[in-house]
Image: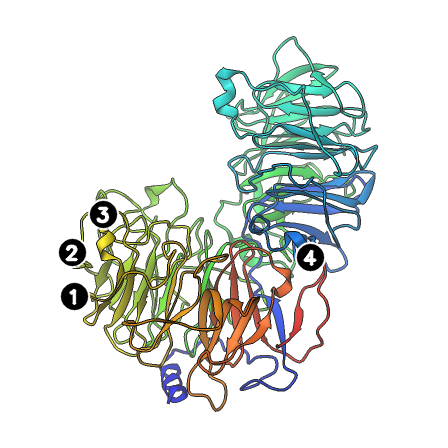
Amino acid sequence: MLAACWAMLASVAPASPDLRPTRAGTTGPVANERYGWRPVAIGGGGFITGQAIDPRGKTHVARTDVAGAYLWNADRDQWMQLATAATLPAPERDSDWVWGGVYEIAVAPSRPERLYMAMQKAVFRSDDRGQHFVRAWPQGVPLDLDANGPYRITGPFLAVSPRNPDLVLLSTQNDGVWRSEDGGVSWARLADIPAAPPETAAKTKGRPDLIWFTPDGSRAWIMAQGIGMVVSTDPAARTFAPLTKDGPSPQLLRRGGFDRHGVFRGADQEGHAVWQADGGRWTRYPVVSNGQEREVAAVVADPRDDGLYAFSPYGSVFRSGDNGASWWPVPTRIGGAPASEPSWLSALSFNNKLIVADVIPDPVVPGRLWASAGVGPFRADPPPGKLWLTWSSQARGIEELVATGVAHPPGGIPLFTAWDFGIHARADLDRFSTTWGPRPRVLIAAQDLAWSAGHPEALVTNATDTRECCFEDGETVLAGYSRDGGASWHRFPTLPVPPGTKPDDPKAMSYGTIAVSSGDPDNVIWEPAFGRSPFYTLDNGKSWQRVVLPGEVLPFTGSYERYPYVRRTLAADPVVPGRFLLFHSGLGANAALKGLWRTDDGGRHWTRIMAGDIAPANGYSAKLRAMPGVRDRWFFTNGQRGPGNNGLRHSRDGGMTWQTLDPVEQATDIAFGKAAAGHATPTIYIAGKISGRTGLWRSIDDGATWQMIGERPLGRLTDLVAIGADPDHFGRVYVAYAGSGWLYGEPTPCRPVPIGRDTVSECVAVR
């Protein structure tokens, strides 16, 4: 019955690129079954906040603000993730704080196999170029570093002596500068780094000091933000004194470095200048173009002729041939990437400019520049004459989109939703994206995407601009619909104004969760974020009416409050047209609304079918999911990890009563895929914990028994936020991560082997 239902749904889908069958082509579990896991190839997409290369070019690393750090593998011609379960010490792998980005990473100049990597609560050291890390920060010593903080694009915050790979300095956001001379075994805070005076303390709060060693390793330099540069009085960097007490000097720097002659230059973004320190004195060189002083994000000396490049934070480039006395603009463009590179990165609408965190020179290739940019690392090789720059993306191997989910309609192709770069519709999971939706634009987040069970080619999304600026283009909210499985998108003709917001608020309707009726693709319900009221439309957005829940207290009657969370508490019934379920968490003045609500007429009238909580702690990342093709079969999870009553709930009566589904102890999300041969219900997949074991699980018998199909695929440590499944091919499942994109797993003939730093795919035995 179910297979026939889904076959009928697939038959009405429009022609679209076929998604190839699974590698095994199986229709159900087999003896000695294996699962293969690979990244969904999107390519880049996240902020590279810094890079480092040793003087001989042996080791090249990059840090990110949301998902670890990467090493360039020249043999594979791609980047490899450094922060994984295969590389980090076992005690750290299950710590929540390793899910984020890397605060700073540094290479020891005299020993390129030695890496130091600072994460939120610890510093790690590797002596084999990241194959394995050991903890290099003493247990019990508090450390709190934010890789996604407001000053993440400044730096460097870690520096290793060129003379001694065991001598390392670390600058923190709120606890000063620390020193280790034994490779991180012990640390001591430097006592003579001055604190900012009261008049600048507020401006520099949380802004880390910057650290360098001179190229010969004879001195360490520290930019004490709000104070000025201090320099060590000994090569071991034990004591420090001001570089100069006389004359003007920079008080704040964003970036800086030494040229081949040992001359230091710093980028002063606030001061719109490049500062040069030579002989213990400072000289300020304003970067002036068209009579206007420009912000400076980074400054680089070209070792071929000592000419200078200055880079604005927003991608403008200027060059000086007279040591900074005068500057001229350098035209730039984005292009020229290798064929193996994600092509969509070169199509970004930045007006051929890069949003840069830093630019550094290549120590081996003369004139080559490496940019740490808002969508990945880029490279430029200025031609003779240096009259222009062509930035070429070099992101292959990096998957750094902040995923929000996966949707795979029957008969269609999977669509992957993310912050900042929207929706990626993918017929070939192993080839990089070429474009994204609702349309290529900087920036747009697809917080949610839903498809109609009766019309699977009909999709809706609540895509919203993630920036808190730039509202003048009128496209802050690109919420809308697709009628061709996501190949093209159209904006809703109108947007409502929820109570408690102003008509001119560009984000009055933004983020949240959205659903579309199984019977009528024009019937959409959208609950925006910030606790604002849900609305429904019966004419595909030409007009909207507010969802009215009996007993509500205006103005904020919704329950999707914290917009960054991946929360799905509104869903259309896949079998009954016009029926929707909405779980209300009882926010603020509407505590009395807590419970599960149902409408059978597309949103006009609502009845609470269950009062109170389905599960505790449901105000964050709860998921309400309906099993396709099965009447009244629903699942609910609070999406929480750790101790507490976080089990998976299920209902067989349309949500009126709920039971805990044993032995599931925790579920981040639930997905439904093609039924196994001989089974009447879809295959259930969960990411969570069963009988004390955490991983990815599959049940072909409606939750009666479970098989583990992956524990921690490819060693990913970033926060798993959602999963999806293929309704047309048995066994294929998708996993979404908060900072490292997506993986997909499927039955695959392969041989399980341990994963390592350079693993690009994984094979596991189904257990």
Q: Is residue 579 shown above or below 104?
A: below
Nearer the observer, disc 1 or disc 2?
2
Q: Nearer the viewer, mark 4 or mark 3?
A: 3
Q: Amino acid at mark 3?
A: Ala
Mark found first going from the N terminus, 3 or 1: 3
- In depth, the one of 516 and 484 nearer the eye is 516
Badge 4 is on which residue? 78
**Quick check: 73 left or right of 719?**
right
- Report the Cα–Cα distance between label 4 and label 3: 53 Å
Indicate the secondary structure of the residue bearing disc 1. Answer: loop
Q: To which residue does mark 1 refer?
A: 605
Q: Nearer the viewer, residue 706 or 751?
A: 706
Which of pointers 4 and 2 lies earlier in the amino acid sequence? Answer: 4
Q: Can you identify the residue that label 2 sits on?
A: 551
- Where is residue 212? Give x, y as percent: 71, 29
Residue 589 numbered mark, or none: 3
**Helix, strand or loop for disc 2:** loop
Which numbered disc flags the more N-terminal residue, 4 or 1?
4
Indicate the secondary structure of the residue bearing disc 3.
helix
Label located before the other in sequence (1 or 2): 2
Up the image or down, 125 lies above or below 730; here it is above
What amino acid is found at the position of numbered circle 1 in the picture?
A: His
User: Within the image, what quadrant is residue 252 found in?
Assistant: top right
Q: Within 10 angstroms of label 3, few (less than 14), some, or many (20 or more) residues?
A: few
Of 39 and 707, which appears nearest the observer?
A: 707
Real-space CA distance between mark 3 and mark 1, rounded to the nearest whole angstrom: 21 Å
Quadrant position of the C terminus in the picture:
bottom right
Quarter of the figure with residue 41: bottom right
Q: Quadrant of the N terminus?
A: bottom left
Does label 4 or label 3 sit earlier along the sequence? 4
Q: Residues within 10 Å of mark 2 (few under 14, many from 20)?
A: few
